[in-house]
Every structure is written in C-alpha cells, then in structure tokens.
Amino acid sequence: MSEHDTKAASTRTSRKKAAAAVSGAGMSEYITVVIEDQLFGIPVPRVHDVFMPQSMTRVPLSAPEVAGVLNLRGRIVTAIDMRRRLGLQSRDRTAGCMAVGVEHRGESYGLIIDSVGEVLRVADADMESNPANLDPRWREISAGVQRLESRLMIVIDVERVLNFTGQTLAA
Amino acid sequence: MDDLLREFLTETTESLDVVDVELVKFEQEPNNAQILDNIFRLVHTVKGTCGFLGLPRLEALAHAAETLMGKYRDGMGVTDGGVTAILHSIDRLKLILSELEANEAEPDGSDDDLINQLNALSQAEAAAAPAPGAAPAEEAAPAAETAASDDSAAIDPLLDRPLRPGEVSLDELERAFQEAEGPELAAPAPEPTPAPVEEPAAASAEESEGEGGKKESVANQSIRVNVDTLENLMTMVSELVLTRNQLLEMVRRLDDSEFKVPLQRLSNVTGELQEAVMKTRMQPIGNAWQKLPRIVRDLSRELGKKIDLEMIGAETELDRQVLDLIKDPLTHMVRNSADHGLETTAERVAAGKSDKGRITLRAYHEGGHIIIEIADDGRGLDVEKIKAKAIANGLVSEAEAEKLTEQQIHRYIFAPGFSTAAKVTNVSGRGVGMDVVRTNIELIGGSIDLRSTHHKGTTFTIKIPLTLAIVSALIVEAAEERFAIPQLAVVELVRTKADSDHRIEHINNTPVLRLRNRLLPLVFLDQFLGLRSSAEALSEDGRTVTSDEAFIVVTRVGEQIFGIVVDSVFDTEEIVVKPVASLLRDITVFSGNTILGDGSVIMIMDPNGVAQAISGELNEMEEIVAEEQQGFTSDGETSLLVFYAGSKEPKAVPLSLVTRLEEFDISEIEYSNGSNVIQYRGKLMPIMHVAEGTALRSEGRQPILVFTEEERSVGLAVDEIVDIVTDRLDIELTSEVPGILGSAVIRDKATEVLDVAHYLTRVFADWFRRKEAALQAGAAKRLLLVDDSPFFRTMVTPQLAMAGYQVVHAASVEAAWKLRDAGQTFDIIVSDIEMPVTNGFEFAAAVKKDDSWSHIPIIALSALGSSEAIEKGRQAGFDDYVAKYDRDGLIQVLNEILDAKGEAA
C-alpha cells in the first residue's frame, strides 16, 4: 500500500517537472514499464497514477483485452490487460502486477503491466520509427522506438492502446 | 463567455418561458391584473437588462411588447391579435437570445415587422381609449430607471434580491405608471410598408419553437448552481457514503471502540447529506409542463378546437435527468390528444358534449415511481380502425384479431410505424408515433398503458422511476461473480429445488419454469454471460447443478416475462449507477456499473438488453411453451402413477383411473379358471399382467393396482411402483401394441402409457357386451364428447360407454357444429374448456342459443378447477362443471342431470 502510494506521489511530482521540461527542449519524459521483459515507455503527461490493481471485477462479454473494472479511490477504472493487448499470454490473475492509470476522453483506464520502472528523460532526437518487421499488434500501439544506452524502449501510444474495438470485431 | 452575459441568458430565457405560460393564462382571464403585472414585470426586466448590456435589438423589441402590455394594464381591451403579436415577439426574443448564446453577439436583422405591428396595436387601442395628454409611459420608465440605479444595492421587497444595474424596483415602476396614466400619443407612426421578415430568422424561429427550451428553470426563490457542480457533489457524497460504510465495518469488528460515537454521528450526517444532495437533483414535473399551455393554445387555433388544459400535481418532484427525458414524449402525447383525441367543436356539440375539449395532466407519486396521466375527454380510440390497420400492417391475422380484447387492440397503437391519422397534419401523423414515445419511456425503465372508452375519451398512464441515479438493485451471484439487477424489472424471486414445487424443467433441451400455470422461458445467467459453458455446469452425475438448487429472478421487460437463473441472491442495495467506460458501452446487457458498500465494483444488468439479446431465443421458447400449453390439458398437470411391469421401461397410468394400490402376500394369490385371482373384499378379483406370460413374484408381497368399475374389480400386477408424479402428459408416439396408448416423456424418461380399458375388457369379456345389452334395451343415451385431446377422448370413452352411454366424438367445436348441421341430436354434451379456435365457454353459450341444440344439457370438463372458472362456466351456460379425471364425478353428474331431465319430461 505505502509503496505504491509513494510511487504515485513521486509520479505526480515528476509530472509537474516534466511539464516544465518537455516544452521546447526537445526532451520527453517517460515512465518505463516492463511487459514480458520488454521495456516500454508511457509519456509522463498521460499518466495519472500508478497503482496495484486489487479486487478486479470481470466484465463478461467484453473484449479479451479488458481485464475488468476496479475501484480506485472511489473511481471506477477499466483495466486493460497489456499482455493480451500485445497478443501475449495473460498472466495469472493473482500475480502481483502493477497498473498505470491514464485518462482517456474523461474516463479512467488502467493499463496492467508486469512492473513499473522509473521516470526517464530522453531526447526526442533518439526516437526511431517502428521497425518494419515489428509484430503488427505491437506496431499498432507503438509510437516509435527510443534508443537508450543499453536497451530499446517502445513508446506506447495511449490513444491507440485504448482503441481496439475494430480489432475485437475482426477477431 | 462573459459571466454577466451568461447569467443574463439563463435568466432571460427562464423569464420568457414564464411569460409564455402567463400570457396564455392572461388570454383566458383578461381581467386578472395580477397575471398582467407579472408579465409586465418580466418583460420590463428583460428590456432593462438588455439596455444595460447594450443589446439594442432585444431592447427595442421588448420595449414594443412592453408598451402594448402597458396599455392592457391601463384597462384597454385585450384582443386575440394583440396576445398573438406579443407571443410572436417573445418567440423572436428567444431566437435572438439563442443566437446571442452561440455567437455572443446580437444577430443582424430587423424586427421592424413585429415592432410596427405591436405599435400599430398600441395605437389602435390608443385611438379608442379616452384620456389622452398624459406623459408617455416610456419616458417615465427610463426616468424611473435612473432614479433606481442610484441605490441599486437596495433589496427590492418584491424581488427579494438586490436590484441589478438598470433594473427598476417595482414600486418605482408602479409610481411611474401612475404618473404616466393614459396611452402615449407620441408613438411613431407605423411604416407604410413593414420591412420584410428576415427569412432565415423566421424559419429557425419555427424550429426553435418546436424544440422547446434547453434551459432548466428554477423556482423563483433560488440560487443558480451549475449542473456540473451538483453532479460533482453527488459523486463526492457517493464516495463519502462508501468510505463511511467501510469505517463502520471496521469499527464493528472492534469491541468498545472510542470511535463508535463520533462515527455514528458521522454516519447520520452523511446520510442526511446524501439525501439533501439527492434533493438538489429533484425538480417539479411542472418544469416539463411549462411549454404545454402555449402549445395547446397554438394547437387550439390551428385545429379550430376549443381546448382546456388542466394540470394537476405540477409540484410532484422527480430527478432532473428523468425530467429531461420525459419532456418530449409528454409534449408529443399532449399534441396527440389535442389532434386525434379531441373531436372538433361541431362534433362535440353534436355528441352532446361541452364544446370545450379538456386535456388533463395529472402527476403523483406511487411507491418509488411517478405516475403521469394524460387524459382527454374526446372520442376515444377507434377499435375497428386500429384493428384494420394492425391487420393491414401484418401485426396480427384476421382470425387472431377477432379474439383480441379491446384493451389488447388498443395497445397496437404502440407498435412501430402505427398511426391511424388518415391525413398527415402539421400536428401529428408525421411518422413519429406512439412507438417512439413508448421506446423513450421504456429506456428509462418506465412503462406506458392506456384506457379508452368510446366517446368518453382516452387516458394514457405513464409510470417512471423517480430517479435514474440511485436505483434499488438486487445483488445476485452467478459463477462466483456478482451482478446487480434493477429491482424495477424484478417481478419475484423463485427458489428451485429438484424436489420442490418449482423446479426447472426442460422442453426439447430448453429450460422452462412452471409458475402458477405459466411457463416461463429461463436464461442461465452464467451461460448467458459466457462465464460457464453448459458442459461446465454439469456435475459428474450428468445432472445440471443449477437445476437442483437455484434462484430464478422473474424479470419483466414490457410484455416479456422471463426467468434469470442465478446461483444465489444476496440482498437489495441502493446503488448509484455510473456509466461504463466507452470501451464497454457496446455490451448492451449492462446498463452501468457501481461501487458497492464493500468497495468492490459490480456490473449492473440491463433487463432490456438481456431481453433483446435473448429475444430470438425467447420467441422460439415461447413458441414451444405455447405449443406445450395447448397440449394435453390446459395447465398440463396430470397426476400419473409410474411403475415398472414386465420390462425395464417405466409405465404409467393416470392416477385417477386407479382405485387403490394394494400389496398382497404372494401366498394369497390363487389360480382358478385359467387366471390368477385373489379374494378381495369378499369377491374374487382377477389379476392381469401387463405383458403376457409374465410371472408373479415367487415370494414376498406382490404390488397390485386395483381398478374398480361398478363393483367389479380387476388387479394389475406390477413389478414395482416407482412414484406418483405430476407432470404434463403428452403422448408423443401412439402405439400399435394393444393395451398401450403410446409413449410420453415423463420426468425426462420415455414412459409407456397404459390403456386401462384394454385390460378391463380382457378380464370381463362381457364388459362391453353388458353395455350393448343396455343400449339395446333402449336406455342408451347419446352423448357428445367435445375434446381436442385424442388421448383424453380415448381415455374417457370406455368409462362413459361402461356407464351406458353411446359416445360420439368431436375433436373441436367446429366438428360438433358439423354434427348439428348433419341433423344429429344428443341427450347430453360433455365439453372440454380449453380448446383451440373456439373454447368451451363460447361453445356452451352458442349451444344455449342454438335452435336445435338449446335443450341439450351441457357439462364442462376441465382441469381448471378454480371457483371463478366454475362460475364463469355457469354463466356461459354450462349445466355443471366436472374436473377432468374425476371419473366417478362425471358419471354421477351425468346421471343426475339426465334423471332430472327425465323427471321433468
């Protein structure tokens, strides 16, 4: 409990800093998350909070990507299973995963990921477009690939993550 | 937008709405000075504020209208044309306001046409009025304004708030008017050719008139709060309630906690706060009615009818969200009443009614609902016209239509695309029919019904929930997930168990519930939501787990009633409905979600969505159910004795044919004259076997079914008596084997149904011969048996034959009439009640009226044993009423009636 509160608090402060830093400097801030050992980055301005999903309610008949709905401090948050979104095997529900809260058209969503890393400030110039051979499911949600010193980070396009109705219909 | 401008817009729109209503009232009571004062004050305020904000177009128009009203105040005669002109100015003001709202600037254009008209009217009146020479009113008014603006902070006693800049206190105004007695002479002469009306403006004016205002009006003595603020407050209070509940739960676990007292207090305050916030969402329904007087007035002119609109219960409160949703349907229905419902004045007079038609709106609370009635005293619905239209639209066949009650026919006006208006008028008949009204009302969980009496009028009754924000919901569980079902849709809860009265049965693998002579289609919530497949629902022994013990939530959506099968039912909770995220909005079976007291999120089922999702299935089920219900007996209930005899297949006989179940020690059974016999009640009773060559038990006790007929008994040896079941008996396969009528599914097992008559005749070869002898003796009475069930005809005929009747069958009432037409006559008729096409009640009534058959006594034979049914039977013309399978009763009644008849003859 206290752990994730601290994280959420630190996120909030860093968001403020980010807002100041992002403008004009050609730098962007990302919260790094890990899904199946792959590093992903979510743009800090999009992130509301980071929390540990608890007592999730399943939503029958929903798209498989929807993990369920849960109560986050009195708000109902719709949780998206990022593993499924990426076409990966879903993790056991009881496993202690984390979620990144984002807002989308006035509604709260939680992106469920394996774990949360840190806040990274990187230069926009280091951003590459998606490699042509990237899995289409990954390409769909990726805004590009950020070259870090030691590894690559896929930048998540939150809008596109939450737009999967077409895909669900096709499936 | 400028705050000042926004406030002006809201307030002015409201004021104009009130003016609309007041003007219509004023037209009816031109001498009511109070109404006029009120209108005058409102228009004056509008004018004053416009001047202050620098809105010349609005100001000029308001001024011209105000001038004319000033004249009326001074005692000038009120004319129709005058009021119409003022109403038109109000419409124009609203139009300008709406553009002002959109563009934050007055639109270009001229209102000279209206202003000239108003001025001309003022002047015409002026010419007629005496006492000229006083100062013009409009000069006095600005003067008063200047005076008042000096102490604008002073609180005006009439308005109960500080005067706004540019506003004049009423007292000031009054004084100014007293001083400025008499009409003005200095008013500008009307222009010879009024400027043409601005085309687009006029067109949109009409549109906006139809749509009505989008602003909510608040009662006079109130402050204005942004709706979003209230919504926010509501959300926060909901969260507060949840937190309180969690705290209470925690403290409950602690003994003797010092938190208890303050928490109790917190709890109370929270509850009150919640109630108070709920109240802020409530508005009187009168707000939805505000436009109606004006609409009715305009209609009454357009249609040339005199119409009174009466509104009762305008103060009845309901949630503003519901109010918004109900506004348009209400307006539509009032238009309908005025257009279709009420006759023209000439027709009314000809019908001996008052020339003024009356439309009554009435609202009241009733158990968590608000009931709104829209009644007219017009011509009532034309049943024949609706019927013809329904047949033309293919909604019902001609034959079916004949059987419908008036009420059922009336309801067709709610069918899609149904409008009986022969010609399309401006008012109604535009294709937006009552079906849209019904859909809109059902969308908010309401229902609509109507009553109509020819020449007396029509009353529509709308029942809607008070609020959509908080609903009472039943919390249920299926496949370990909880769901909320809105209590509004729940009719009742039924608990089923394999051995209880209510159990889940299957027809062709379709689950149904038999509930008070009705078969309800069932939906297993877990399977329906894909939480558990039907295979998973089966336990090891192959039986459906849920059918052993489950709860069925009997749900009604419109006309549809179905059962939702759930694993368990928890509680009823008041829940705050929150919309689901847009990602989930395409799942129609959920209407929202909410946070429960324990902090978990729960999905709220939408019964409408469920009904739609399963409607294909349901229709199919209903067909099956309907077929079943036409089956063997009306309610399908037959008590059957199930046993084993000779083979592994279970066998059954109707219990009513069995006199006794006996068990004899095997040693008591003797062999005589080629068959087994036993001494039974001082007589020798032959013992039969179902299958030839079956042996009796070698030792122990032998179960025997005893059939008795006229002091003669026959025993049927069976291997084992299994059970007595009450089930529907449907002979699915008829049998060629003598002694077996056919096979039926009883308790999910194929069961042979025995033909008892066969065994009786086998033992007593003279059984029927005796009858024939009796017949030949001339005592034979001709009996007509009318029953649509072949099984029952086969079953009852031998008994009647045994009792000495010559039985003629008719499979339907129609077949019976053919016999009559063939010149046949009978001593007595025995008829079933529940039959397709023509039922027994109608048959009996027809027999009693028939020339050739009216003397024949007729007996009802039915499974419907209720006292009402019996009474109905007597009224229809039945001489007596006998329950099916009461075979002794039937014979006895037959004898009594025929004896009585014989004596009388």
Image (cartoon, helix red, strand yellow):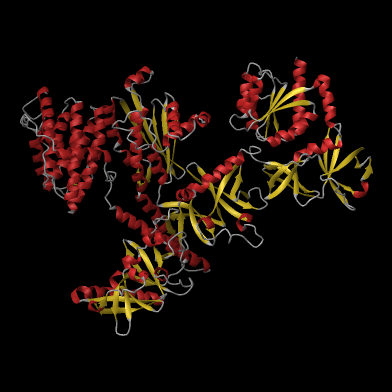
Front-lying residue, B837 or B740: B740
The percent position of residue B756, horizontal first and vertical second, equals 78, 39
Number of numbered markers: 0
Name, please, the residue furthest toward the bottom: A150
Asked if one can make out residue B163 in the rendered structure from this viewpoint, the answer is: no
Q: Is residue B795 visible?
A: yes
- Location of residue A118 in the rendering, given as x and y in whole percent from the top left corner: 33, 79
Q: Quadrant of residue B134?
A: top left
Question: How far across and how far down the image is residue A53, in percent?
Answer: 43, 70
B429, above or below A79, in the image: above
Find residue B872 and report its horizontal and vertical position in percent.
62, 28
Q: Is residue B523 above or below residue B240?
A: above
- The extreme front residue here reads B736
Quadrant position of residue A97: bottom left
Q: Which quadrant is the N terminus of chain B positioned in? A: bottom left
* Residue sitting at x 37%, y 31%: B360
Q: Quadrant of the C terminus of chain B?
A: top right
